Image (cartoon, coloured by chain):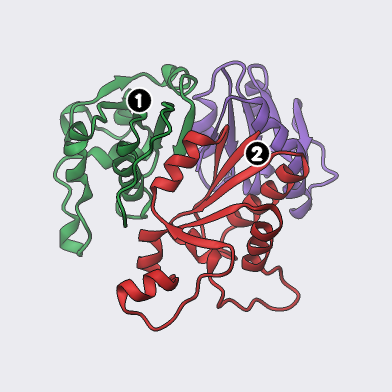
Chain colours: A red, B purple, C green
Amino acid sequence: MKFAILVNEGPYQHQASDSAYQFAVAAIESGHEVARVFFYHDGVNNGSNLTTPPQDDRHIQKRWSALAAESGVDLVLCVAACQRRGMVDEGERDRNKKDAINVADGFRISGLGQLIEAGIEADRLLTFGD
Amino acid sequence: MSTLNIVNKSPFEKRSLDQCITRTSSGDALLLIEDAVVAAVSGTAYDAPLTEAGQNMKLYVLEGDLAARGFADSEMVNGFTPVDYKGFVALVAEHDRVHSWL
Amino acid sequence: MEDEEYAGGVQKKFIYINRRAPHGTVYAHEALETVLIGAAFDQDVSMLFIDDGVYQLKKEQRPDSLEMKNFSKAFKALEMYDVEKLFVETESLQERGLNESDLLVDVELVARAKVAELIDQQDVVLSF
């Protein structure tokens, strides 16, 4: 079965992105496909490569990036949420004349249409949030 | 055509569990995750209403979230089935849609 | 952001369930954004307002005094996007001392006992 996941909250503040990650891993281990994780609202902060959590804590961004690399999960950050919160990839840097990039490997910035498309194409869409 | 309802808030803080169970139909299922898992522990004010809700729908609780909060070995309200994340995945696959009561 | 068009030809039943008041958090505003973007995908869209979600449709909201956007105006434009199924739960209005005349758009009232049935007819449930 093909799953899509919506993550509405940022890392470390709320359990939502941990729950979403555990679900994604279990789904893949159960033989399902996780086609896309869409990060919305503060959820886009999951994709920042500028985070340095303490060594004895989980590294939420790296966990997501590894999932993308190993299992081909499409990690999409909502563009409007990124622009409001300072999440910048190369395209956004050039477009909005910023001088830095902070979107981690495996993540890409795109529009809300990607969430709707995930709802259409996946067999199940489920939401983790506050 | 059944719905998997997911609640993630403690009913002692937010009303989403009450709001969910008044709007489910028979054949639906309820899964408690995150802070909501405390409602599945027997002997609370939610014991009776959830036992009653269990007459019409299946009740599940995410065991990792129970263990995280110190309730791994506690007695559950009648009718609750503990599931791990793979069980959670199976529930999502079994039901036609998922509704997270955020 | 480029215009996104979906040429997949699949039509699913989407329901957006709104349970939160506007302005205190961003979710109500973003739900509406998603509905407007989603309109380009030609899906079968319903919006359901229950619990504090009914406050989103209250007339005469003036968040502009707080330098916040008055997105409630966009509910009036939903018809142009072919989003015509707006359901409001009767009991949620009553509990809050509101009635249909307090709302800024025409809606279809639905009893609490019928909400589950409405949700059970959908393919995709989106709640923020």
Protein chain holding label 2? B
Q: Quadrant of residue C17?
A: top left
The residue drawn where x is 62% and y is 17% is B27
In-front residue for pair C12/B1: C12
Quick check: A71 above or below B54?
below
User: Of circles 2 and 1, which is in front?
Assistant: 2
Is C73 displayed left or right of A97 in the figure? left
Name the kind of residue labelled 1 in the image.
Glu
Residue B70 location (% of width, % of height): 78, 53
Q: Quadrant of residue C68?
A: bottom left
Residue B73 location (% of width, % of height): 85, 44
Quick check: C111 above or below C128?
above
The residue drawn where x is 55% and y is 36% is A122
Is B64 displayed left or right of B11 in the figure? right
Q: Quadrant of residue B28?
A: top right
Where, quadrant-wise, is the N terminus of chain C in this rendering? Answer: bottom left
Name the kind of residue labelled 2 in the image.
Leu
Element type at mark 2: strand
Spatial distance from mark 2 to mark 1, Cα to Cα? 25 Å
Element type at mark 1: helix
Residue A39 location (% of width, % of height): 50, 55
Is B23 displayed left or right of A92 in the figure? right
Is B64 displayed left or right of A97 in the figure? right
| Residue holding disc 2 | B32
Disc 2 residue crowd, few under 14, some 14–19, many 20+, Cα 10 Å: many
